[in-house]
């Protein structure tokens, strides 16, 4: 089984992708009523409106969870960088 390899780039990329996902969740409702005629028949339009309203609640919960995970990844990246810098600073080729 391969070892787990964590790099600064992976943490930062993951955090950036989560930020994008959160933005999509936060702005999805802007598209919900963009063109109601796309659904055609009035019963379908009504059902999609109901779905959009119900989904808004769940989307809010998911957005909050994604935001919290994003913050944790940011904190991990900062901690990783700090630890890496401390380890680098502690290495010395000088002899006394």
Image (tube, helix red, strand yellow):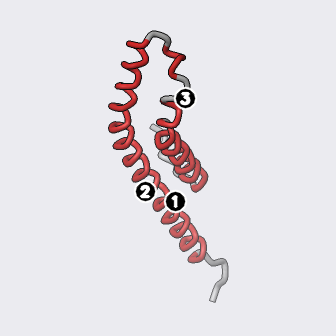
Q: Residue furthest right?
A: 94
- Disc 2 from disc 3: Cα separation: 34 Å
Give the residue displayed 53% in from the left and 32% down from the top: 31
Query: Of the residues under marks 1 and 2, which one precedes in the sequence?
Result: 2
Q: Which of the two discs, 1 and 3, sits closer to the camera?
A: 3
Q: Does 27 sit above or below residue 96?
A: above
Q: Which of the two discs, 1 and 2, sits closer to the camera?
A: 2
Tell me the crowding category of disc 1: few under 14, some 14 to 19, or many 20 or more residues within 10 angstroms, Cα based: many
Q: Which of the two discs, 2 and 3, sits closer to the camera?
A: 3
> Element type at marker 1?
helix
Query: Of the residues under marks 2 and 3, which one precedes in the sequence?
Result: 3
> Element type at marker 2?
helix
Q: Does 35 sit above or below residue 19?
A: above
- Residue 48: x and y in percent read 41, 21
- State the quadrant of the C terminus: bottom right
Using the image as rendered, state which of residue 58 and residue 70 is in the foreground.
58
> Element type at marker 3?
loop
Using the image as rendered, state which of residue 30 and residue 91 is in the foreground.
30
The residue wearing badge 1 is 77
The residue wearing badge 3 is 34
- Disc 1 from disc 2: Cα separation: 9 Å
Give the residue displayed 47% in from the left and 36% down from the top: 29
The residue wearing badge 2 is 72
């Amino acid at each position: 089984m391969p070892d787990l390899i964590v790099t600064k780039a992976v943490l930062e990329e993951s955090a950036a992708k989560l930020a994008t996902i959160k933005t999509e969740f936060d702005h999805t409702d802007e598209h919900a009523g963009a063109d109601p005629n796309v659904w055609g028949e009035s019963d379908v339009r009504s059902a999609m409106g109901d779905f959009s309203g119900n989904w808004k609640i769940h989307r809010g919960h998911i957005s909050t969870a994604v935001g919290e995970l994003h913050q944790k990844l940011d904190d991990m990246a900062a901690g990783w960088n700090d630890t890496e810098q401390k380890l680098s600073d502690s290495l010395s080729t000088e002899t006394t």
